[in-house]
Image: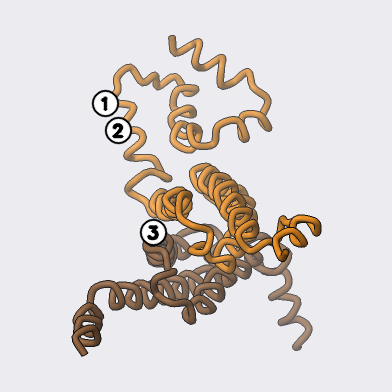
Amino acid sequence: MATSKLQALWNHPAGPKTIHFWAPTFKWGISIANVADFAKPPEKLSYPQQIAVTCTGVIWSRYSTVITPKNWNLFSVNVAMAATGIYQLSRKIQHDYFSEAEAAVAKEQ
Amino acid sequence: MMFIVKDFFTSLSPSIFDFASPVIFSFFGDLLSEVLERKQLFSMAAFFRAFLDSPVGPKTTHFWGPVANWGFVAAGLADMEKPPEMISGNMTGAMCVCSALLMRFAWMVRPRNYLLLACHASNETVQLYQLSRWAKGQGYFLSEKMEETKSQ
């Protein structure tokens, strides 16, 4: 019974024999790279790149549900991309626009 | 004029047809089939209407997904002049791998998505260049002699 289920997964139209599996699998690399960049100081983040990551994640989450074959692997990876992109953007915006008051206070002291 | 256009498109072999100019054919693919079925497009208005109503046109997410991915190309181009220390080796490397795979994905997905293919072909180029800039900044391309003279 287990082998037939595994076989069904193996032969799935979006399964490991197809690009529909490996493209999203490697796309996790982008989210993992972004998570690794959580430790980077916000000055070194790139606004254009993080905006691109966020927009891609949001739009592709919808795209992955209307293509043939429907690809939940792709859906999940794009949701993660949007999440990491939003977090990085919030870090950079907070550093650029909302920590000025703290820096001014530190200078005065 | 339209017969010249028709001969140009139909005289090419299928493989050249598919790889020659994916950006153009992403929009013209459905329009071409209309032309070949003798529904000739005489006006710009008819041309744009066909584009707007296309199953991979701007009313569908099959269009906006690839448009979003052009953001990566734009971001890569915007970062061309920035110092290499600002390039993220992680992200750039990951994108080089992913764009190669997504080119194949765009080819195999249904409906076939030429716009996505064009996008990731460009992104692959841009990200490989940025990766080379990053690697040079990290010192990967220095020969041993140059490293000795640097350390002296």
Which chain wears orange? B
Kindly identify which residue carries mark 2: B49
Q: Quadrant of residue A8?
A: bottom right
Give how far across and how far down residue B63 sits, in percent: 41, 48
- At label 2, the amino acid type is Arg
Residues at discs 3 and 1 in contact (Cβ within 8 Å): no
Which label lies toward us, 3 or 1? 3
Residues at discs 2 and 1 in contact (Cβ within 8 Å): yes
Q: Nearer the viewer, residue A9 or A57?
A: A57
Residues at discs 2 and 3 in contact (Cβ within 8 Å): no
Kindly identify which residue carries mark 1: B45
Q: Secondary structure at mark 3?
A: helix
* Residue B92 seen anywhere in this rendered image of the structure: yes
Q: Secondary structure at mark 1?
A: helix
- The CA span between labels 2 and 3 is 33 Å
Give how far across and how far down residue B128 sits, in percent: 61, 52
Could you tell whether B47 is left or right of A97 in the image? right
